[in-house]
Image: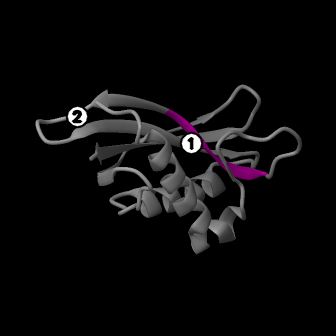
Amino acid sequence: MSYAVSAALQSAVYTTLVSDPDLINQIGDAVYDAAPPGILPDVYVTLGPEKVRDRSDKTNSGARHDFSVSVISEEAGFSGAKTVAGRISDVLHKANLPLNRGTLAGLWFLRADARRTSDGTRRIDLTFRARVDDE
């Protein structure tokens, strides 16, 4: 197993999201590894936790990454957040992301969890699965 491709995968996901014109039209540059301190936009995206499992074989070191991308919204309803989440799903599902280390064998949408948080914001956690090889 290799966890070494994790940073390359995260970088590729981030770059893909901040480079998508439709997503930029929806939220500007509000895509964060972690939400910065201070006043945040009404709708923003954060890269979330991941779980990684070994998927090596006789020829390659590889891993399965299940990772989250979250949409957080201060808006009254879920409509805006769901539009942003839908765009993220469209951009990432089955995307062919170039990695600066390793190779992405596949990327799939797994699930989404939408909820109101205790502070009244709306939050949608999208979970994706990536299969990577580290040659």
Q: In which quarter of the image is residue 120?
A: top right
Q: Which secondary structure class fits the magenta region best?
A: strand
Q: Which residue is drawn at 32% across and 53% down?
A: 104
In this view of the protein, which residue sits in the foreground, 83 or 28?
28
The amino acid sitting under disc 1 is Ile
How many neighbours does mark 1 have within 10 angstroms: few (below 14), some (14-19), or many (20 or more)?
many
Q: Are marks 2 and 1 in contact (CB under 8 Å)?
A: no
Q: Quadrant of the N terminus?
A: top left
In this view of the protein, which residue sits in the foreground, 57 or 86?
57
For the residue labelled by badge 1, is the local secondary structure a helix, a strand or a loop? strand
Residue corresponding to mark 1:
124
Judge whether 55 appears above or below 20 on screen. above
Residue with the most extreme top position: 118
For the residue labelled by badge 2, is the local secondary structure a helix, a strand or a loop? loop
Q: Residue at x 82, y 47 (%)?
A: 40
The amino acid sitting under disc 2 is Arg
First in sequence, mark 2 or 1: give its number: 2
Judge whether 92 appears above or below 66 on screen. below
**Residue 94 painted magenta:** no
Task: Specify the segment rendered in magenta.
Answer: 42-49
**Residue 43 painted magenta:** yes
How many neighbours does mark 2 have within 10 angstroms: few (below 14), some (14-19), or many (20 or more)?
some
Residue corresponding to mark 2:
55
Question: Residue 114, how many percent across, how many down?
Answer: 54, 39
Question: Residue 18, how many percent across, how many down?
Answer: 61, 62
Residue with the most extreme bottom position: 21
